[in-house]
Image: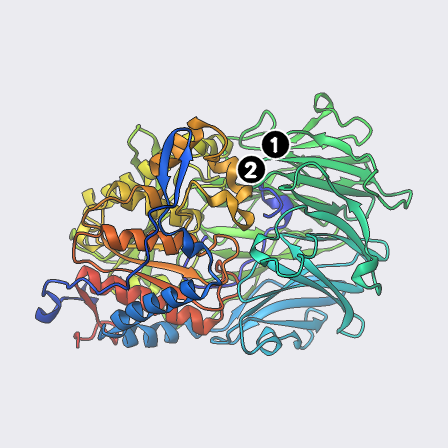
């Protein structure tokens, strides 16, 4: 999900996500356009893009031309020249917007506040991500004792000053002596896993390469991790995404000595990961075809025997139709605690005897409820179940056997995460955020259930000036869909408020209230932000998700179109002042809606979108999305429904909204060729004068790890483009006369 800027959150552990292991106002403050802004727009002079009419694919008797396929070679000189020429046109257009720099200045002002994540407790050490305000990357600090003094543990800003580097803590060993750290450069999904000695707080010589979508699982004197084979010399890294295996690395050894634990020789396109239970009694193995269901296995480690590729893992869940996850092993009962959607599309928590893992012997600990069970964490011998009620968090605590239910009182309606810890811990931390709360951290006492504020940032604006409401609108087929609407208190429904509609709609991902400083650029100008919880997401469980998958994907687009029409009908805005935005799968959403309803809005902002639905599976991690989308190569039926909505293949000559496409040259998840081919086709199809441009960020990937300076520039460009193309001049200082 792309919300416009980065902030801190408590990352939910794997057992809190039912996903495969890979693997989001002052009305008077707006001025109308001055006379010179009301002049008819002139279409920019787009660079010439070579069109190869000989490239045509045959899908079950239907020809599908692909004239811009050469742009998929994103390392060629010709493609690099094309990117440079497109960026030059875009930057010239943006530089000519007189208030662009004022937006950047204001955004930088409100972005500049101290930010802090929830502490991670490792023995008596506490690790925290902090940013003083405008640091490009957050610094990881460590203190000895909760009341100790912070010291720099890792400063990513010093690791690679020439390019953005994302560094994340992956988890500590059971004895709290060692920490695994993930290092990702230039926005890539590729990871280097480095190890640190927490006694000396210094890096070890161990570095594990060629990992991607990997976690770590500590056991004895080392750890399990997932990696791909080292690519042969000359192989593009973006193509090296097959035959993922699991290895065991012994501390101090070179990677070449790592022990192969699991492999498969039949299917190259599988994702695999290993976990270990808190006491290292069992290892768990998760195998997935992509981003949907997965298989779950386990093995008893108590005999101390290293697994090998020949080891027979005990199956708990076979097939890829369900999501069953071992979250803990309880030594007192000798049972696993397992979340599952088997016979429970909104999920339940069950107890499983490792000696009797058949589903007929599973026992409910927390039965399925009316609301979605998003996940369960353990800590202090307790269970913390996180539920979604109409896309907002509710937390309930239980005894280990599921008794003694108590609701944890959160600060308000929003999104919370955390509460996890070891059995012997007496407290933990959790985060709470909303559309108007940028993220407060609370310390939670397991014995008393009391929450104490640990950190709340000081802001350059007053969150109390804004309000959030939730409406339910009707989609094309009569389905009721929830939507959050955020605005400054006192904003009236004039039918002409600047508005941005954001959504995702896929992969069982739930969009819940979250804070974005970038949105304040809109809200403090009297604008309206709307977030729609479309089908395809996970807000109401697997049934809601499956209603937006594969051949039912059109439901997602219908839900989004209905959301836009609802905002207009309710006079929050009109078509001339409405923008639509989405990233990744949400970028696909924006591209498809543009093709189907070019009249829907004034501005479209597709970010790193999946635009070519016939060939997405051929690049990097794309094969992992076929459980969600299907594949044009699988059958005539799947080709037909994919071809029917594929953004690239459905752009026809029309008057399209002003469009600014975003991508990164190092995106190895949704390769930039999707955006390259889409904008080339759109520039040919545009019949109106509204600009259709692409912004290609260098040294950037799918979104992770972007430095603050890059975020500020990108968001300033976005909002300048938005205001320019709805004919509104933002007022700076806020509320002052327009200049």
In the image, 508 versus 611, the foreground residue is 611
Q: Residue furthest front?
A: 54
Residue 291 seen from this side: yes
Q: How many marks?
A: 2
Disc 2 target residue: 292
Can residue 563 be seen in this snapshot?
no
- Relative placement, left or right, of 23 versus 580 is right
Q: Measured from the top left, where is residue 557 in percent x and y?
A: 33, 39
Q: Secondary structure at mark 2?
A: loop
Q: Residue at 77% of width from left, 46% of height from top? A: 277
**Residue placed at 51% from the left, 45% from the top?**
618
Residue 709: image quadrant is bottom left
Seen from the viewer's position, the closer of residues 112 and 468 is 112
Q: Residue furthest top?
A: 360
Task: State the CA–CA distance, disc 2 to disc 1.
Answer: 7 Å
CB within 8 Å, label 2 to label 1 = yes
Q: In this rendering, would 628 be left or right of 326?
A: left
Checking the image for residue 348, the label placed there is none
Residue 152: give x, y in percent of width and height.
65, 77
How dense is the environment of label 2, judged by Cα within 10 Å: few (below 14), some, or many (20 and up)?
Answer: many
In what element is the residue under mark 1?
Answer: loop
Q: Residue at x 44, y 57 (%)?
A: 672
Name which of mark 2 and mark 1 comes first in the sequence.
2
Q: Find disc 1 in the rendering and name its residue.
A: 320
Q: Position of residue 663 (x, y in %)?
A: 41, 59
Left or right of 689? Residue 108 is: right
Disc 1 crowd rating (10 Å Cα; few below 14, some 14-19, many 20+) is some
When the figure is inspected, residue 613 is found, relative to residue 204, above or below; the finding is above
């Amino acid at each position: 999900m792309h919300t416009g800027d980065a902030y801190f959150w408590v990352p939910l552990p794997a057992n809190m996500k039912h996903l495969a292991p890979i693997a989001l106002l002052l009305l008077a403050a707006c001025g109308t356009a001055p006379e010179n802004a009301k002049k008819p727009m002139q279409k920019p002079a787009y660079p010439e893009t070579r069109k190869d009419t000989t490239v045509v694919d045959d899908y079950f008797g239907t020809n599908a031309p692909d004239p811009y396929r050469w742009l998929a070679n994103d390392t060629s000189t010709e493609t690099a020249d094309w990117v440079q020429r497109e960026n030059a046109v875009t930057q010239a257009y943006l530089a000519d917007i007189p208030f662009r720099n004022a937006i950047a200045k204001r955004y930088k002002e409100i972005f500049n506040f101290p930010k802090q994540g929830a502490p991670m407790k490792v023995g008596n050490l506490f690790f925290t991500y902090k940013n003083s305000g405008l640091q490009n990357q957050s610094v990881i600090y460590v203190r000895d004792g909760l009341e100790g003094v912070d010291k720099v543990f890792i400063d990513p800003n010093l690791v690679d000053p020439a390019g953005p580097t994302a560094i994340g803590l992956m988890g500590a060993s059971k004895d709290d002596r060692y920490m695994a750290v993930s290092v990702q450069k230039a926005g890539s999904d590729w990871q280097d896993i480095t190890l640190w000695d927490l006694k000396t707080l210094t890096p070890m010589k161990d570095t594990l390469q060629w990992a991607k979508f990997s976690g770590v699982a500590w056991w004895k004197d080392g750890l399990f991790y997932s990696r791909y084979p080292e690519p042969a010399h000359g192989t593009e890294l973006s193509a090296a995404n097959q035959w993922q295996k699991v290895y065991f690395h012994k501390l101090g050894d070179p990677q070449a000595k790592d022990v192969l634990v699991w492999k498969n020789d039949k299917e190259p396109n599988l994702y695999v990961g290993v976990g270990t239970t808190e006491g290292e009694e069992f290892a768990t193995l998760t195998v997935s075809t992509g981003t949907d269901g997965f298989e779950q296995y386990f093995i008893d480690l108590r005999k101390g025997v290293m697994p090998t590729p020949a080891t027979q893992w005990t199956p708990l869940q076979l097939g890829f139709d369900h999501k069953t996850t071992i979250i803990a092993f309880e030594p007192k009962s000798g049972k696993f605690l397992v979340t599952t959607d088997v016979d429970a599309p909104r999920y339940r928590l069950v107890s499983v005897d490792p000696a009797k893992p058949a589903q007929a012997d599973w026992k409910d600990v927390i039965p399925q409820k009316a609301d979605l069970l998003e996940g369960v964490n353990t800590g202090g011998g307790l269970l913390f179940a996180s539920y979604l009620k109409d896309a907002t968090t509710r937390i309930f605590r239980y005894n280990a056997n599921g008794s003694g239910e108590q609701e944890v009182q959160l600060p308000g309606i929003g999104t919370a995460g955390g509460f996890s810890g070891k059995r012997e811990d007496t407290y933990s931390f959790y985060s709470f955020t909303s559309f108007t709360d940028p993220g407060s951290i609370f310390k939670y006492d397991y014995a008393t259930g009391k929450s104490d504020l640990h950190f709340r940032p000081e802001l350059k604006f007053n969150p109390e000036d804004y309000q959030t409401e939730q409406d339910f609108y009707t989609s094309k087929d009569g389905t009721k869909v929830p939507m959050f609407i955020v605005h400054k208190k006192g904003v009236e429904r004039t039918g002409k408020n600047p508005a941005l509609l954001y959504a995702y709609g896929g992969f069982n991902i739930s969009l819940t209230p979250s804070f974005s400083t970038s949105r304040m650029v809109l809200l403090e100008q009297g604008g309206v932000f709307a977030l729609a919880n479309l089908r395809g997401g996970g807000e109401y469980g697997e049934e809601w998700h499956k209603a937006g998958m594969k051949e039912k994907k059109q439901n997602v687009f219908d839900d989004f179109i209905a959301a836009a029409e609802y905002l207009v009908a309710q006079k929050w805005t009109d078509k001339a002042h409405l923008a639509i935005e989405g990233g990744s799968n949400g970028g696909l959403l924006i591209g498809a809606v543009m093709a189907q309803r070019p009249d829907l809005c004034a501005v479209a902002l597709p970010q790193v979108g999946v635009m070519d639905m016939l060939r997405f599976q051929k690049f990097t991690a794309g094969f992992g999305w076929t459980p969600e989308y299907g594949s044009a190569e699988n059958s005539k039926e799947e080709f037909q429904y994919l071809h029917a909505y594929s953004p690239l293949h459905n752009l026809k000559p029309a008057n399209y909204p002003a469009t600014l496409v975003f991508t990164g040259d190092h995106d190895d998840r949704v390769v930039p060729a999707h955006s390259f081919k889409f904008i080339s086709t759109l520039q040919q199809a545009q019949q109106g004068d509204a600009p259709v441009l692409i912004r290609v960020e260098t040294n950037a990937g799918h979104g992770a790890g972007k430095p603050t300076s890059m975020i500020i520039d990108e968001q300033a460009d976005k909002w300048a483009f938005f205001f320019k193309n709805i004919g509104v001049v933002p007022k700076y200082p806020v509320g002052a006369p327009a200049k």
